[in-house]
Image: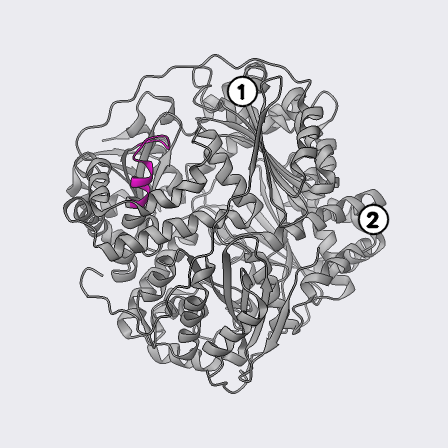
Amino acid sequence: MQIPIEHKTLANGLRVVVAPDSTAPVVTVGVYYKIGFRLEPQGRSGFAHLFEHMMFQGSENAPKMQHIKLVNSSGGVLNGSTMYDVTNYYEAVPSNALERVLWLEADRMRALKVDDENLRNQRDVVKEEVRVNVMNQPYGGFPWLDMPPVAFRNWANAHNFYGDFADLDAACLADVQAFFRSYYLPNNAVLLILGDVNATEGFALAEKHFGNIPAGPAPKFADPAEPNQTEERRGDVVEKFGTLPAMAIGYVMPPRRTPEWYAMALLDQALHGGRAGRVHRELVLEKQLAVEADGGVDDLFGYNGPTQLTTRIFHKPEVSSEETVAAFDAVVRDVQQKGITESEIEQLKVKWRSDYFATLEGGRGGYMPKYGLMHLLACFTLFDNEPQLVNTILNEFLAVTAKQVQDAARKFLQPQNRAIVFRKPAPAAEKEAA
Amino acid sequence: MATQAPRTASAVPALAPEREVRWPKRTKSKLANGLELILLESHTIPKFHGELYFRSGNAAASNRATALAEMAATMVRTGTTGRASREIEEHLRGLGADLSVGAGQDNSAISFAGLSDQAEPLLQLVNELAREASFPASEFERERRQKLEEVKLERTQPGFLAGERLRKILFGSHPYALVSPTEEQVAAYTREELQSLYRDFYTPENAMLILVGDFDSAAMQKTADQVFGSWSGKKPLATETATPPIPKGRRIHLVDFPGAVQTQILAGCHAINRKHPDWIKLGLTNSLYGGAFNSRLVMNIREDKGYTYSPRSAVHPMRQHGYFSVSAAVRNDVVAASLTEIFYEFDKLRSLPVPDAELLDAQNYLTGVFSMGLATQSGLLSQISTLALNELPDEYLETYRQKVRGLRPEDVMAAARTYFDSANMQIVVVGDRKSIEPQAALFGEMQVFDAKGNPLS
């Protein structure tokens, strides 16, 4: 399967990627900025995400509420999301609205026009977002917010990505404009146009609307490198509502796109590939210590700094944490000592190929066509300057051998490369008092 | 938005002429054993997606045990006469396939997706699961324990508690009132009753197979006939259930959730199913009210007032009935203020005609989003499934946009008056009783429950 892709760089440094496909009269537009919550300013935890909300609050020619209104009333849907190393803004619209959407994205890349009232409003909205997703849910934030402070030592990787409320309260309009000036530059972004468009038209419209946005000085990024880890790290978090003890076990991944990284991705499949995965099979189906066990790398193609391969386990209350860790360790030891069979690696690859196709086609929540393709193209462009990787990277995964998977398990699934977070239900008495 | 006139954008590019929306051809047939088959080609990726639906779910099983169809569905993949659980899972992985089995109120379904070049073996496995599930005793006890933990856990989720309470209030003694079993009910399930349900529900006369993806329809038709042709079985006896009465008078139902740092609001009333002639009208009205980002409620309580992150309204169609609901998770100190705005927006749509420009925006939204289903295999599958399960006319896909565009402000007002029944709206709030009770009590006669559903004084 080959996806037709064309790309070019405008004079202001904006990279533009067009992937034409006339299957449906729908076009997906995305703008990705190379800044996520990992490298947001210290003392401003949660700011990258709060800022993302501000991008919907008004730009030079499209005041508050107009951005959303213009996309919805063109028959389209839109959203944005803040990730570790990128922030995206995207729309899927009937293709006759393409120019309108490009105009809107260009308008907010050129100038953000927001006031204190907008900031107060979105700070309130974000706090309710944190409450609904984290503070008022069983296992909210587990493990994506629980793990970083236990596993990492560099503030960039270890802080609260959703934001401490005191930091959100401290954020002011000057921070918003400074962040915008530093990172929301054409030379720190990629524009993606996918679907019902031809390349000539796509590039012409990109030039027309984005071509005269001035470039800025190349952003300075803090170094996210972690100091060397020498022993296992552990931490505890109290679970306020849930009824089962849970744990997350994370191993730091090798650098992106190295042979070991591809092997770890297949090892991840061997461990966590659904109900056939070794962790689920052993802990849930065979030994029956756990009620649920799964895992993976959070957004394998979308990060660009230290990250982990993480297993999540919800175990039976009558089974101790230590027994559960021991059972998990036995699964790891088995791969390290015996490796995986030829037939297993073949199965893993077939599944990998099938999943990769689904990612390329895949929507987001069933409503955003080509979200997956957009995400991969954007990350390969921003991190690697190589959008064509979308068409070649699959082969790297399919070339991994059973031996490489075993070697990766031996080298990386080591205690001095891991952290464990235990999320334990509060004792009943404490719950009553809550 | 209620307090400040929005400024409009300047120099917005106009929309280009629309490109034609063309839905792919559907091939419909019925095998000799009664299995309905719908095929639709979509060549976006070398894969295909499928659903094998059975037209009986938890509602049809409610005279046996609560949510029994769901428990049976959970068991289907855990063993067949020819394969143990582990063999099934590894076979699926080797085919590059995903598969799940589930049941809702009205249907049970085996849902799957796989590589086109492995279509036949995947269909063979689906056939095996539909006909030869063996319900191994040890797997049953394991799944039962998992289900027990699951039903305990869902009682710690505000969204679940709100939904469960609203369904109880709206549907009373009708099976649609039951969304989940109690721990005692799970403990009482027997393997025999699951097997008996499986024999009754999982039959070709009760089934419909929909396949969407990268295949040739004629060849796929042959494959499906070969794979499923020798299956036999009758339609189960239909169960008749009396129409539930509509609860009269606006009431408030508070589910106490000690320690909650936010309050989950869910208000709802009876509405209609998809076959009802007002369906599209109500869909458009819902989209104006709270069904889209750009809707009045979202603009009001999120973008203007910042009370909540994700307010939404929706119409929930089921086979026999339907209901409307609006939900918002709000700050504890603005429960009353949020409810006031929720009702203000209902009553405004009931009292004043929608301005033409706003109506046009909503019509564009609904028709645009409808066509997005065209772009992916799973999107097409979901559209075709909706049509087929609700026995909607085949040309529904082609005529939907026209029907939406034909609606006028008076249609919206009529739908709002009929279906946004503010006088009889049932309001559920899930939150910390001591923080929110006085605010909640402002909206009607109140009853308080604990998370297990027991009334509190």
Q: Amino acid at mark 2?
A: Gly
Q: Secondary structure at mark 1?
A: helix
Q: Is residue B136 visible to us here?
A: no
Q: Position of residue A32 (x, y in %)?
A: 52, 69
Label number found at residue B206:
1
Q: Position of residue B30 (x, y in %)?
A: 58, 23
Residue ID at (70%, 52%): A268
Q: Position of residue B240 (x, y in %)?
A: 38, 15
> What range is drawn magenta here?
B272-284
Label number found at residue A339:
2
Screen quadrant of the C terminus of chain B: top left
Vertical placement of residue B219 versus A101, above or below: above
Vertical placement of residue B312 versus A71, above or below: above
Q: Position of residue B45 (x, y in %)?
A: 65, 49
On screen, residue A50 versus residue A362, left or right, reads left
Q: Is residue A86 visible to us here?
A: yes
Residue B7 part of the magenta-drawn span: no
